[in-house]
């Protein structure tokens, strides 16, 4: 039953990712550079920059969490 939930969640997430990717593909395919308004282009750049910053900050937080977890485990193992 545990594997069925993981497989179901995997298909669900994959479907959402495929729909988003297809929407982005169709959106960029139909837009020429001359038709893009300056506000829209700046907004897209800001959104992409925000996503990159969020992704990098999550990676650093996970890295720090793993270091702290390793230190806590070592302290627990040393105690009787």
Image (cartoon, rainbow, N blue to C red):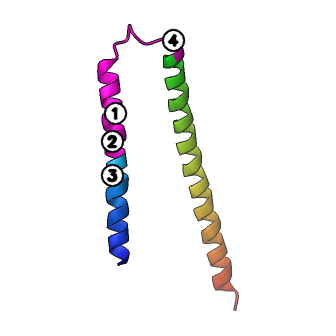
Which percent across, then down, holds residue 20? 37, 39
The residue sitting at 69% across, 92% down in the picture is 80
Mark 1 element type: helix
Above or below — where is 62 with respect to 37? Answer: below
Instruction: Identify residue for label 2.
Output: 19
Specify start and end residues of the magenta stretch as a single range: 17-39
Is residue 20 highlighted in magenta?
yes
Foreground label between 4 and 2: 2
Q: Quadrant of residue 26?
A: top left
Residue 50 on image: x %, y %: 56, 34
Give the mark nearest the N terminus, 3 or 4. Answer: 3
Residue 5: say if magenta.
Answer: no
The first of marks 4 and 2 along the sequence is 2
**Residue shown at 62% from the left, 61% from the top:** 65
Q: Which residue is mark 3?
A: 14
Residue 28: horizontal and vertical position, in percent? 34, 23
What is the crowding at mark 4: few (fewer than 14 residues within 10 Å), some, or many (at least 20)? few
**With respect to residue 65, does 40 lie above or below?**
above
| Disc assigned to residue 11 | none
Mark 3 crowd level (few <14, some 14–19, many ≥20, 10 Å Cα)? few
Separation (CA) of disc 1 from disc 3: 14 Å
Residue tagged 4: 38
From the image, tell me which residue sits under label 1. Answer: 23
Which label sits in the foreground, 1 or 4? 1
The residue most toward the top is 34
């Amino acid at each position: 039953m545990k594997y069925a939930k993981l497989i179901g969640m995997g298909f669900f997430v994959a479907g959402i990712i495929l729909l988003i990717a297809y929407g982005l593909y169709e959106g960029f395919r139909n837009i020429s550079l001359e038709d893009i308004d300056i506000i829209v282009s700046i907004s897209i750049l800001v959104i992409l920059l925000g996503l990159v910053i969020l992704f990098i900050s999550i990676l650093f937080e996970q890295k720090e969490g793993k270091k702290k977890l390793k230190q806590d485990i070592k302290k627990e193992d040393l105690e009787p």
